[in-house]
Image: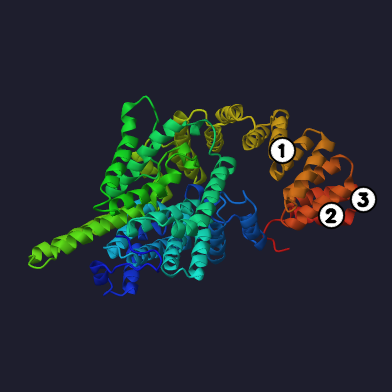
Amino acid sequence: MPRSRQSPRQVAPDPAAMRTERVPFGWYCALLFSVALFAYGPALGGGFIWDDDGHVTRPDLRSLHGLMRIWFEVGATQQYYPVLHSAFWVEHLFWGDATLGYHLVNVLLHATAACLFVLLLRRLAVRGAWLAGLLFVLHPVCVESVAWVSEQKNTLSAVFYLLAALCYLRFERGRAARWYALGLACFFLALLSKSVTATLPAALLVVLWWRDGRIAWRRDGLALAPWLGVGAAAGMFTAWVERTYIGAAGAPFALDLVQRCLLAGRVAWFYLGKLLWPADLIFVYPRWTVETGAWWQWLFPAGAAALVLALWLARGRARGPLAAALLFIGTLFPALGFFNVYPFLFSYVADHFQYLASLGVIALAAAAWDRWAAGNAAAGATASRRTIPVAAAAGVLCVLGALTWRQARTYGDVVTLYRTTLARNPRAWLAHSNLGNILASTGHPEEAVAEYEEALRLVPDSAGFHYDLANALVQLGRIPEALAEYGQAIRLKPDYGPAEGSLARVLAGQGRGAEAVPHFEAAIRLLPGDAEAELNLGSLLGQLGRLPEAIGHLEAGLRLRPDFPEGHNNLGNALAAAGRMPEAIDQYREAVRLRPDYREARYNLSIALRSAGRMDEALREYRQAIEPKGSGR
């Protein structure tokens, strides 16, 4: 019979849990931190990848005012996770853009989450808690979350998620308000680190059902109702941010409800498969085609439903498997396909989506192992029989550790990461594009062109890929081809400001100033506040003799970028040509003040001073303009 719900709950001691208490918890923590640092060692020297520059604090957010924007301005950061971005803000104070610090923090957070996981299982008297912690810290599906700086949102939110769970369970024993408040505070911090943690209150209800065989709605439901409400609000807000600010909307995300159900079934089985057999893990998995007319795709949701039904029917003998399944599917729910998330643009699955969801399955596997080990250790068992479970666990941990070390090594070098991804998924257009960007920025434009062309073969209507290809072609001096690619990018995306500006600069560089003007004007219209476009257009208009327009654009550009000496020199030229010599002299002097070795500006200043009849000053500036470098005068 279920125990009375009127008194604080007491969990019956488990013999296996009592055995593990003999080893101090601190030793477990030391072991978990040690193996985590060793297994992830190859990733510690890795650089930033893909969207890390959108998470590591940008220059405009590195002040106290920037910290306020992180909290109170939606869109100031790539995703509205202010606790995460505050952590990045603090980390940047310590080590700037040096990646080692970020990687170390991620590994330490992962190990901390593993320690809290063990503590939670021990609090619940779950068998095999120590093995569960090691499985979690060494499982290779966690590598993407730990070795990728942007995914500090996973490791940080997991720490707060598990702390919140521990606090609630402590509250649930004695109903002390301070533990409830502390747990709710940790839950808020988890949500503001990553909103997938909104599934925690439902997970707690599953855990309580597993432990007691039922849920007391007046006791547990009312206590967790505020948590459920806050979590639901956070989830809906994140879904809105994904659509509005990140771009998780449009044709690539247009799935109806039936398709989303088909997708959810397949996604769940995919993650379970990778958890049980972590082979061929990829940074970007192939993107599936969801077809309601393909009979075999119905097997995934049907199989998932059949498994849950079978576990439900077997709950009288063992509730653990059903609880683990509900925790797994429930925690995965935000990433099953019912809500649009930006990565669905290139793949419906990613290892980092199951970071938290893996905990339930890992706990079940560890408990099953411990029961097996206890059975083999029964009185009268042979020594060899008693050692089989221990040897099996050691073997699994060694294999997982080796796989994690190998997977972490691919994150040690971003080029290796993308080349490894493409070797396993040649149709990963994201990897082709990102690899092209790296090659182009490191002086390998010919190889970059090949990657961009392959990306365009896979996604021919991508304006961004045409634009990137055009930039690489400019590096190679293949100007006619570059102009054609810029034009194609603009045809595909008429409001593409960067393409308009780049096309204008190339045309101007080819002496085709009249053709460049409308493209500069378009860039300024599409990118208000673009100082470079304003200054370039002003300089070009000055060369074309359109002086009033030139002066206006140069002044506008210098208001945006007053510390640009070339802009002041060009404005001086336009003012001098317009006969406004005193103003021209002021601009030339400002250019020289900003850059004392700016010979062209000094020469122009000397000419302007001579025209104004100030011969002594003109001669002095002229001498400095022609003075050989390094003369010491």
Q: Secondary structure at mark 2?
A: helix
Measured from the top left, where is residue 272 in percent x and y?
A: 32, 46
Measured from the top left, where is residue 78 in percent x and y?
A: 56, 49
Q: Is residue 324 above or below residue 478?
A: below
**Between marks 3 and 2 in the image, the one whose residue lies nearer the viewer:** 3
Amino acid type of the residue that numbered disc 3 sits on in the rendered structure? Gly
The one of 488 and 342 positioned closer to us in this rendering: 342
Q: Is residue 466 above or below residue 328?
A: above
Amino acid type of the residue that numbered disc 2 sits on in the rendered structure? Leu
Which tag, 3 or 1, sits closer to the chain's start? 1
Which tag, 1 or 2, sits closer to the chain's start? 1
Kindly identify the residue that appears in the image at 32 percent across and 62 percent down. Answer: 133
Q: Is residue 523 left or right of residue 443?
A: right
Which tag, 3 or 2, sits closer to the chain's start? 3
Q: Secondary structure at mark 1?
A: helix
Characterize the local packing of mark 1: few (<14), some (14-19) or many (20 or more) Cα atoms within 10 angstroms.
many
**Quadrant for the N terminus in the image:** bottom left
Is residue 376 visible in the rendered image? The answer is yes
**Quadrant for the C terminus in the image:** bottom right
Residue ID for mark 1: 524
Residue ID for mark 3: 613
